[in-house]
Image (cartoon, rainbow, N blue to C red):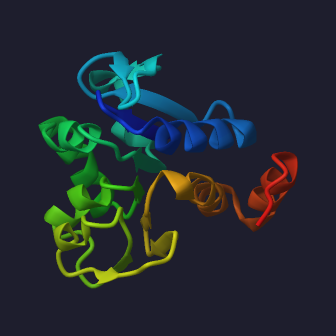
Amino acid sequence: MVYLFLADGFEEVEALTPLDYLRRVDEHNIATVGVYDTEVTGSHGVTLQTDLHMDEISFDDIEMIILPGGMPGTKNLDKSDKLHDVIDYCAGGEIKIAAICAAPSILGKKGLLDGRKACCYPGFERELKGAKISKDAVEVDDNYITARGAGCAQQFAFTLVEELYGKDAAQKLMQQVVWME
C-alpha cells in the first residue's frame, strides 16, 4: 500500500497529482492519511476528507510513503512523532520514501539523505544534511525520491509510478494524460 500523508497546509498540486496518477494505475493501492485529523485543508484552501487517520495505517503492507510539501504543511508533518515512526520504519526496511518541495527537509534533518542525491524547493537545501544537492526536477537515490516543487508534480508522479509499477506503466500513463515534454 502507498500512503500519502496530509496535514493542514499541504500543497495541493504536490499531493493531488501523485494521488490522481497513482489511482489511474491502481486505484486500490494508495490511501490518503490524515496525520492529525481526517479532514485536512491545503495551503490554498482546498479541504479534503482523507481515506484513513494516522492511527489506522498498517505497517505490514507499506510499499511507499509520500510526503507533499507546502507551508505550513511540511512543518505540521514534521511535528508528528507518529509520522517520524513511520519514516524510521520505512528507512530501516528499505521501503520507498518520496518527498517533494519542502518535505525533503524532514528527511534531511533526520540524516536520511546523507551522501544521497536529492532535490528540494529552492532555499531548503541547507536542511538536506549531507545530501548531494541536485537541481533536477526529480531525483531517485536508492529508496528515496525527492522533487523540487509544485511545477515538478507531474514528473514526480510519473517517477512514483515507474518506481512502483515499472517503466511501461509510466509510459502508458504519460500517453493517457497526454504528457507533453
Q: At 27% across and 62% down in the image, what residue appears?
A: 92
Quadrant housing residue 129: bottom left
Viewer can see residue 49: no
Quadrant housing residue 9: top left
x then y, percent, for residue 14: 48, 45
Quadrant housing residue 128: bottom left
x then y, percent, for residue 84: 19, 46
x then y, percent, for residue 180: 80, 60
Q: At 15% across and 63% down in the image, what residue appears?
A: 109
Residue 69 drawn above or below residue 54: below
**Which quadrant holds the C terminus?**
bottom right
Viewer-nearest residue: 112 or 181: 181
x then y, percent, for residue 66: 42, 47
Q: Does 130 sit left or right of 22 as displayed?
A: left
Q: At 55% across and 52% down in the image, what residue appears?
A: 153
Viewer-nearest residue: 117 or 112: 117
Q: How many marks?
A: 0
Q: Does 124 sit left or right of 2 as displayed?
A: left
Q: At 41% across and 55% down in the image, what residue appears?
A: 100
Viewer can see residue 30: yes
Q: Does 59 sit left or right of 96 as displayed?
A: left
Residue 140 drawn above or below residue 70: below
Viewer-nearest residue: 62 or 176: 176
